[in-house]
Amino acid sequence: MLRRSMIGVLAGAAVLTLPLTAGVAAPAAAATALATTITFDDSQAAEFKSAVAQGVEVWNTSVKNVQLVRATPGARVNIRILADNGWPRATLGPVRPSGSVTVWMGRQAVQQGHNVIRIAAHELGHSLGLPDVKPGPCSSLMSGSSAGTSCTNPKPNAQEAARVEQNYRTGANEQHPDSGVLISDAA
């Protein structure tokens, strides 16, 4: 008898646990739904497409208020990514869903030995509203080329991630005063 009662209690506890767990998962899904979606087009990124995809992944795992998503054909593009022979550069954001910026993945920096994934994440950081921090340590993604060719860190530090989160917090749709400025990362 005691055994049956205990099983009944345990079964009842499991039933009670299920709705509580489901209630906890809902806010996380709602928070993700509130993220600003920024689209990108890497169709003209040539040999940099893989590095761009990795740079996008860095940002998508580092921040929650904004997510970068590849644009579907015919859809609005917020970040256009091009390959060229110059130095990497980008239009300073933060780009909004109604706006557009351009990132140039310049071959010159790669030829000089800079890490291509770090370049992609750095230039995307400009699109998300981060200026250069030069000179700077390798631990700062936005230190760019000033960290040297041995630096391969493609991740924003806590302050950089926090600034992007602030740029895309709910209701933060105003344009930053420096938005639209072209930033070249030439050493």
Image: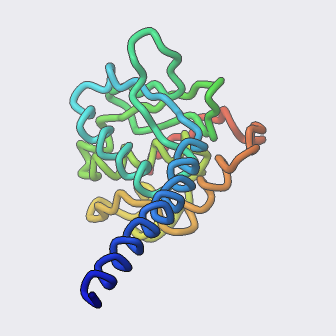
As drawn, is 22 to the left or to the right of 7? Answer: right
* Residue 164, percent from left and from top: 59, 53
Please tell me in which quadrant of the rendered image residue 35 appears.
Answer: top right
Q: Report the front residue among 128 and 152.
A: 128
* Residue 21, percent from left and from top: 46, 64
* Residue 50, percent from left and from top: 23, 37
Count the marks. 0
Furthest-front residue in view?
A: 1
Q: Report the front residue among 75 and 45.
A: 75
Colour setting: rainbow
- Of the 4 image quadrants, the one containing the N terminus is bottom left
Question: Relative to residue 9, is residue 128 depicted above or below?
Answer: above
User: Which residue: 30% across, 39% down?
Assistant: 53
User: Which residue: 27% across, 52% down?
Assistant: 115
Question: Relative to residue 148, is residue 75 depicted above or below?
Answer: above
Q: Report the front residue among 74 and 47.
A: 74
* Residue 111, percent from left and from top: 23, 42
Question: Relative to residue 179, is residue 19 depicted above or below?
Answer: below
Q: Report the front residue among 67 and 81.
A: 67
Question: Relative to residue 110, is residue 148 depicted above or below?
Answer: below
Please tell me in which quadrant of the rendered image residue 178 appears.
Answer: top right
User: Which residue: 36% across, 34% down?
Assistant: 105
User: Which residue: 40% across, 18% down?
Assistant: 72
Furthest-bottom residue in view?
A: 2
